[in-house]
């Protein structure tokens, strides 16, 4: 059947219009999905940047009273942000480190210290699970399975692994009356040793400092290795150029007191008290270290 041009025009318009409508519908739907995804990504990035900025402001603050009074509100804010973005590694890492730092600096009640350490450790485990899938169950998995994924940690994963290791160590320290918690120390030591192999200078020599602590927790008669611990402490101080004052304080407390070396003990603490605490990223911790150094030095005559 032959169609005139008029018939052709009338016949094809509805088909052409429906086709355009479908294209526009798909386009609008796709655009909506892209915009929602973009907005989500932007908001997640903004939130992470906010957390990083506020964390830096706290850790670089040298006024302990301001931080002590103001930090709890920020910790609550972090809890809320994590609820909105439960898989945001930056938020989880900030929450883990700040809860741990606040407890170490300002909390004296044992029950509250345990609560903060549990919270910090939980956040760190969640962050590790997002970043390193095999790390989702680090406490209960068979030790050989634990060793396998720890051995595969790469340099890019050091920050998240370090957060897990330090919060884990803090949790064990807060639960020293629980032998099941102490039994997990071998896992933390294995994890920190891997981090140390990848980047011993991370966090101003932090891996070396923690390894020193692990070797001096017990006296030699119970398995401690204080002289190996001393080498770790000395290396940590060397890596930070002496700017990470906590390394010197812990060196004095863990090693010098363990082997009854008062001269080393007092020299380390006097160096801390005479130093400048203002160091990017650890100013708050250095101020806390100076307070701890004063207490240890004042008790030195009685201890030795």
Image (cartoon, rainbow, N blue to C red):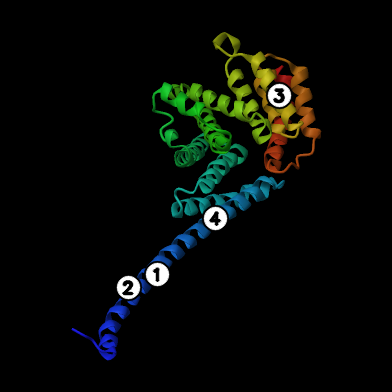
Q: Are marks 1 and 3 in contact (CB under 8 Å)?
A: no
Q: Quadrant of residue 162?
A: top right
Q: Earlier in the sequence, mark 1 or mark 3?
A: 1
Secondary structure beneath label 1 = helix
The residue tagged 3 is 235
Mark carried by residue 27: 1
The answer to whether one can see residue 109 in this image is: no
Location of residue 31 with respect to 232 vertically, above or below = below
Task: Return the x and y of residue 119 as percentages of the image width and height.
Answer: 48, 40
Q: CA distance from mark 2 to mark 3?
A: 68 Å
Q: Nearer the viewer, mark 1 or mark 3?
A: 1
Q: CA distance from mark 1 to mark 3?
A: 60 Å
Task: Return the x and y of residue 157 as percentages of the image width and height.
Answer: 55, 37
Task: Return the x and y of residue 260 as percentages of the image width and height.
Answer: 70, 14
Q: Are marks 4 and 2 in contact (CB under 8 Å)?
A: no
Location of residue 39 with respect to 11 vertically, above or below = above
Q: Nearer the viewer, mark 2 or mark 3?
A: 2
Q: Quadrant of residue 301?
A: top right
Q: Earlier in the sequence, mark 4 or mark 2?
A: 2
The front one of 246 and 211 is 211
Q: Residue at x 37, y 74 (%)?
A: 24
Secondary structure beneath label 4 = helix
In the orientation shown, which residue stands out farthest toward the front? 2
The residue tagged 2 is 22
Mark carried by residue 147: none
């Amino acid at each position: 059947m032959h169609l005139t041009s008029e018939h052709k025009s009338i016949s094809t318009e509805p088909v052409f219009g429906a086709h355009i409508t479908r294209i526009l519908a798909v386009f609008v739907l796709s655009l909506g999905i892209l915009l929602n995804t973009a907005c989500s990504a932007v908001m997640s990035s903004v939130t992470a940047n906010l957390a990083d900025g506020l964390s830096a402001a706290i850790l670089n603050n040298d006024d302990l009273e301001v931080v002590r009074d103001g930090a709890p509100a920020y910790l609550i804010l972090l809890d809320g942000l994590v609820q909105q973005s439960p898989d945001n590694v930056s938020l989880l890492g900030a929450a883990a480190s700040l809860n741990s730092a606040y407890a170490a600096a300002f909390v004296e009640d044992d029950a509250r210290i345990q609560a903060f350490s549990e919270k910090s450790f939980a956040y760190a485990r969640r962050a590790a699970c997002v970043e390193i899938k095999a790390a989702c169950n680090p406490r209960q998995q068979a030790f050989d399975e634990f060793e396998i994924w720890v051995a595969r940690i790469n340099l890019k994963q050091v920050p998240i692994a370090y957060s897990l290791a330090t919060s884990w160590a803090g949790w064990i320290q807060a639960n020293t009356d629980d032998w099941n918690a102490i039994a997990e120390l071998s896992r933390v030591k294995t994890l920190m040793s891997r981090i140390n192999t990848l980047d011993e200078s991370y966090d101003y020599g932090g891996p070396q400092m923690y390894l020193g602590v692990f070797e001096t927790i017990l006296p030699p008669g119970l398995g401690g290795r204080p002289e190996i611990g001393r080498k770790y402490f000395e290396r940590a101080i060397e890596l930070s150029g002496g700017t990470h004052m906590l390394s010197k304080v812990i060196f004095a407390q863990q090693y010098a007191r363990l082997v009854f070396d008062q001269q080393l003990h007092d020299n380390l603490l006097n160096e801390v008290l005479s130093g400048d605490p203002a160091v990017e990223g650890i100013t708050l911790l250095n101020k806390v270290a100076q307070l701890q150094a004063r207490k240890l030095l004042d008790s030195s005559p009685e201890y030795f």
